[in-house]
Image (cartoon, rainbow, N blue to C red):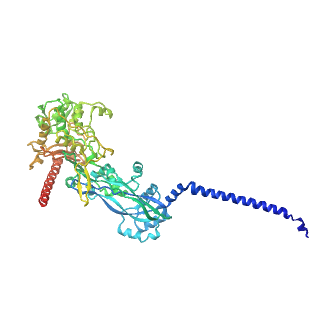
């Protein structure tokens, strides 16, 4: 036996080995127990939660945008359509190198820096994973082809078809309809995220904005199964979107276009209303702009040109233009002074060409330098005698005049569905103090009586007041909406007259004013007869436009100063810059005995109301009557053919 063998203790080594084996076995058992416990926890305890998470990885709920409702005029002419547009989009989850992909796309199709900036902003605003983000809209066929042949080296890039708003009449209706545009960050916070989950567009202005809840529709969805790359493998479930409502307006596009031609090249506004319903037949603000530029985003250059134009094409003169009404409010002022009893309807004034509150005091001039002589109520209206109104205003005071003018809708928004409309200014004692302009003076009342001074009105308000006068005080709230269009089995369009539409929750709804009740109803006819004499009387200020008519027009001319004239100076249009000349105004309704249309016309810096605005109003009324006759003949011919 060697010395080495004598030192080795086999018994001890056996015990050590056994101990280590037991410890190792115990550790293995413990680890196995932990693994089993973990498997139990995952497979049993958290089964439902993890199954849902797993489904989220392979099952997605994709929103489907509804088709936006269409807009028609009263005769069924399409005013706002939806047209397919092709856009190039990117899916972030599939793009390995975003900057490189964008550079490759720029090499294939034109992409501006503004489009890149907008894309990056939309990418940050993305509402959910696996949502494509548009980069460029309205691709041409050639651009689509160039992208398609390069799909294999552009993962995450695709061309998508989308329905976008299209306005076939362009600038003709932009101030009446408004337009839609892409939802911005501010609007995203305001709208219902679920309702707009598949929608990229929203009404920005006008009818498109006010009736957004009707036009938008209800979003649908597709529950789809995807693979690890996010590619859709199959559709598991789907709920179709509900299209938006198609709406019908009171607007007549034929009258709208005829009115627009009458003020072509001018800064002007025309509003025509049906007194029987309050329906707005035409709403023109010139110049306008093409709303199609704004649907998918206007270029910075184009928007700057519109914004900096001295003619203000972005400004809606018909609803937001606030002008001194001039003599157009004299019939309403006359009504206030005789109905209140401040003066008798037989009250007369001698007009030497001026009026003074005190002997030797400031002279408030009449438009006619030599005066009108002895003037009564009717002559004061048809000859637009300022001195008669100065006198009755001084006797009546502002409180009564302001009260009656308010009953005709001045100083407030009375339209139903025109959210951009402004209230104008109806001055009063309280208004002047509240706005820090001091106390009310007698001279303020004189200025108010002839539509000058503090008072400001909009063309819509003037047309509304004309309609109220035509109705002998009966209020019909001005509105664009006529009804909702339904579709029968053949998809033919039928207009539902008097459709009830719940708009109680829509922003901008205003209340209907009460009917105007006079102490003596005969005053209505007396004032209207004086307005008829404005157009048809031998001395009426607008007598030239009343020739050759087989019906009567009741109207009132107006001229509003843009710049002040010194006490002893005479107004000379030729010596003034064009934009400092007087505004021309006219309001009217016709036929005077059975009114069917009420009109207001404002031509900025147009000069006299009788020479500029009144002929335009006459042509609008002529166009309306011609269209009415044309429609009647067409209906009669259709009835004869069908045997009706």
Quarter of the figure with residue 372: top left
Q: Which residue is at 13% across, 34% downward?
A: 352
Is residue 325 or residue 55 the one in the foreground?
55
**Horizontal and vertical percent position of residue 395:** 19, 29
Q: Is residue 546 visible in the rendered structure shown here? A: yes
**Horizontal and vertical percent position of residue 412:** 27, 40
Is residue 378 or residue 308 the one in the foreground?
378
> In the image as oriented, which residue stretches furthest toward the bottom?
149
The N terminus, quarter of image: bottom right
Quarter of the figure with residue 608: top left
Left or right: where 472 falls relative to 242: left
> In the image as oriented, which residue stretches furthest toward the top?
359
Is residue 252 or residue 455 the one in the foreground?
252
Q: Where 283 falls versus 453 (above or below)?
A: below
Q: Is residue 286 visible in the rendered structure shown here? A: no
The C terminus, quarter of image: bottom left
Quarter of the figure with residue 321: top left
**Horizontal and vertical percent position of residue 371:** 13, 36
Left or right: where 352 falls relative to 179: left
Left or right: where 198 falls relative to 95: left
Q: Where 430 falls versus 40 (above or below)?
A: above
**Horizontal and vertical percent position of residue 483:** 25, 50
């Amino acid at each position: 036996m060697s010395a080495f063998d004598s030192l080795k203790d086999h018994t001890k080594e056996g015990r050590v080995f056994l101990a280590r084996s037991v410890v190792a076995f115990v550790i293995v058992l413990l680890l196995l127990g932990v693994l089993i416990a973990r498997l139990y926890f995952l497979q049993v305890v958290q089964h439902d939660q993890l199954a849902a998470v797993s489904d989220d990885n392979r099952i997605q709920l994709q929103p489907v945008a509804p088709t936006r409702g269409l807009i028609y005029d009263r005769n069924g002419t399409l005013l706002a359509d939806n047209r397919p547009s092709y856009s190039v989009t990117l899916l972030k989850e599939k793009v390995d190198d975003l900057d490189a992909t964008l550079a490759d796309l720029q090499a294939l199709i034109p992409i501006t820096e503004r489009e890149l900036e907008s894309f990056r902003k939309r990418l940050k605003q993305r509402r959910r994973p696996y949502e494509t983000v548009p980069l460029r809209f309205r691709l041409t066929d050639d651009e689509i082809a160039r992208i398609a042949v390069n799909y294999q080296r552009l993962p995450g890039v695709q061309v998508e078809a989308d329905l976008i708003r299209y306005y076939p009449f362009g600038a003709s209706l932009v101030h009446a309809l408004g337009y839609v545009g892409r939802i911005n960050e501010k609007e995203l916070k305001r709208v219902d995220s679920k309702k707009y989950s598949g929608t990229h567009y929203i009404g920005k202005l006008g009818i498109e904005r006010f009736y957004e809840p009707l036009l938008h529709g209800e979003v649908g969805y597709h529950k789809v199964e995807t693979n690890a790359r996010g590619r859709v493998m199959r559709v598991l479930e789907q709920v179709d979107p509900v299209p938006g409502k198609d709406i019908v307006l009171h607007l007549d596009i034929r009258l709208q276009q005829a009115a627009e031609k009458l003020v072509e090249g001018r800064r002007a506004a025309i509003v025509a209303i049906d007194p029987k319903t309050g329906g707005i037949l035409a709403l023109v603000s010139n110049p306008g702009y093409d709303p199609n530029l704004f649907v998918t985003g206007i270029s910075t250059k184009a928007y700057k040109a519109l914004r900096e134009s001295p003619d203000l094409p972005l400004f809606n003169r018909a609803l937001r233009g606030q002008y001194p009404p001039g003599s157009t409010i004299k019939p309403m002022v006359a009504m206030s002074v005789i109905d209140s009893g401040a003066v008798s309807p037989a009250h007369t004034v001698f007009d030497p060409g001026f009026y003074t509150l005190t002997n030797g005091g400031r002279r408030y001039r009449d438009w006619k330098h030599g005066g009108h002589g002895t003037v009564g109520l009717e002559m004061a209206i048809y000859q637009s005698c300022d001195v008669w109104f100065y006198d009755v205003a001084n006797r009546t005071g502002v409180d009564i005049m302001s009260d009656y003018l308010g009953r005709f809708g001045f100083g407030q928004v009375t339209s139903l569905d025109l959210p951009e409309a402004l209230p104008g200014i109806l001055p009063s004692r309280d208004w002047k103090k509240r706005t820090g302009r001091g106390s009310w003076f007698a001279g303020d009342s004189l200025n108010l009586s002839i539509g000058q001074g503090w008072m400001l009105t909009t063309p819509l308000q003037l047309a509304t007041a004309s309609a109220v006068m035509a109705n002998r005080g009966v209020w019909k709230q001005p509105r664009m909406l006529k009804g909702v269009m339904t579709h029968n089995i053949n998809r033919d369009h039928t207009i539902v007259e008097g459709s009830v539409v719940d708009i109680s929750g829509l922003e901008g709804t205003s209340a209907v004013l009460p009917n105007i009740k006079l102490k003596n109803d005969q005053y209505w006819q007396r004032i209207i007869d004086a307005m008829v004499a404005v157009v048809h009387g031998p001395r009426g200020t607008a007598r030239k436009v009343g020739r050759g008519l087989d019906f009567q027009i009741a109207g009132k001319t107006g001229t509003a100063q843009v710049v002040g004239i010194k006490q002893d100076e005479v107004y000379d249009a030729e010596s003034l810059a064009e934009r400092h000349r007087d505004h021309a105004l006219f309001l009217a309704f016709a036929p005077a005995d059975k009114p069917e249309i009420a009109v207001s016309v404002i031509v900025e810096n147009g000069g006299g109301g009788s020479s500029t605005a009144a002929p335009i109003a006459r042509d609008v009324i002529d166009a309306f009557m011609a269209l009415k006759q044309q429609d009647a003949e067409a209906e009669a011919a259709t009835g004869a053919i069908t045997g009706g």
